[in-house]
Amino acid sequence: MSFEIDISPIENETADFLHRLHGEIYRAFLLAKKNDGVTQSQIANILNVDKSHVSRILRGNGNPTAKTIAELAFALNCKPSIAMERVPAVGNQRPRDIGGSASSQAPSKTGSTLTPEDFSSKYSVTRVGA
């Protein structure tokens, strides 16, 4: 028995972004902890939230809003930043159209289809089977 997990490009991009976001938040906490002795309890007190809320975010289990990220940055003596970078077309996809969907995008001249190998340099794509 075998099966394949189908993850759309938008789900891949979202997961990648959230992974990087949580990593940056955790690195900022570790740096503040090392340099200033900051604890999760102190952050929770500054933000007026329960320590479990801070712990959840630091473990990567929360989905913090932009406001929460800004507040966390304040508590960690950091300034958050964001960069929106244009990405080149991948496989048979044109650069994303505003309001367009992947199914409405024209195929490339060769008529090739997007394969898991197209993502292999950036994503871990695993086929599970017996």
Image: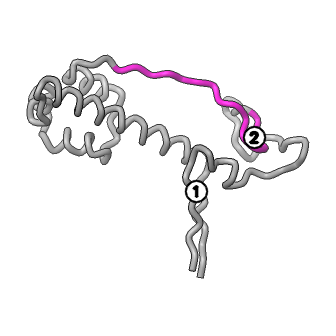
Q: Is mark 2 on a helix, strand or loop?
A: loop
Q: Name the residue under label 2.
A: 93
Mark positioned earlier in the residue sequence (1 or 2) = 2
Coordinates of residue 27 in the picture (x, y in percent): 30, 33
> Which residue lies at the image location 28% right of the left edge and 29% below the top edge?
28
Q: What element carries label 1?
A: loop
Coordinates of residue 92 in the picture (x, y in percent): 78, 44
Mark 1 nearby-residue class (10 Å; few <14, some 14–19, many ≥20): some
Compare residues 110 and 34 and report the one nearer the observer.
Answer: 34
> Which residue lies at the image location 42% right of the left edge and 42% below the top edge?
19
Identity, as a three-letter code, of the amino acid under mark 2: Gln
Q: Is residue 27 left or right of residue 20?
A: left
Residue 10 drawn in magenta: no
Q: In this view, does 12 lie to the left or right of 81?
A: right
Coordinates of residue 54 in the picture (x, y in percent): 20, 38
Figure quadrant of residue 71: top left
**Label 1 to label 2, Cα distance in Å?**
19 Å
User: For the stretch drawn in magenta, what is the main secondary structure?
Assistant: loop
Q: What stretch is highlighted in magenta?
A: 80-94
